[in-house]
Image (spheres, rainbow, N blue to C red):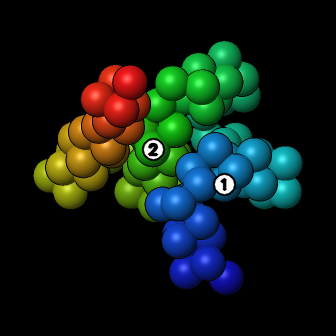
Amino acid sequence: MGLILGALGLIFPRILIVVLYFFTGWFNSMNGNVLYILLGFIFLPFTLLWYSVVLNYFGGSWTTLPIIGMVVAIAADLGAFGSRRVRR
């Protein structure tokens, strides 16, 4: 099940965010702030997913691996915006 959700997250991150929000307690570690979840859903979905992974699996500890993952997630989000501009 985790592998399926991971693949779904890479292909359709916004769908995974909706599924995790409604069917799990995955985003409860964000202290119930729905604004962060909503902004992440709209603008930076990969970053929101990676931030929630850091909070849930790494205990919120920002060591080397979570920082590298955050850089990759931000690059993936910004790369998606850049590819839309080139197509126009």
Residue at mark 2: 46
Q: As displayed, is residue 62 above or below residue 87?
A: below
Q: Secondary structure at mark 1?
A: helix
First in sequence: mark 1 vs mark 2: 1
Q: Work out whether 10 lies above or below 3.
A: above
- Residue 62 in sight: no
In percent of width and height, residue 30 lies at 60, 33
Name the residue rendered at 60%, 25% in the picture: 42
Q: Quadrant of residue 79?
A: top left
Which x, y percent locates residue 33?
68, 22
Quadrant, the N terminus: bottom right
Residue at 52% x, 38% y: name it.
Answer: 45
Quadrant in the picture for the C terminus: top left
Disc 1 marks which residue?
16
Neighbourhood count class around disc 1 (C-alpha, 10 Å): few under 14, some 14–19, many 20 upward: some
Instruction: Mark 2: give few (<14), some (14-19) or many (20+) Cα within 10 Å.
Output: many
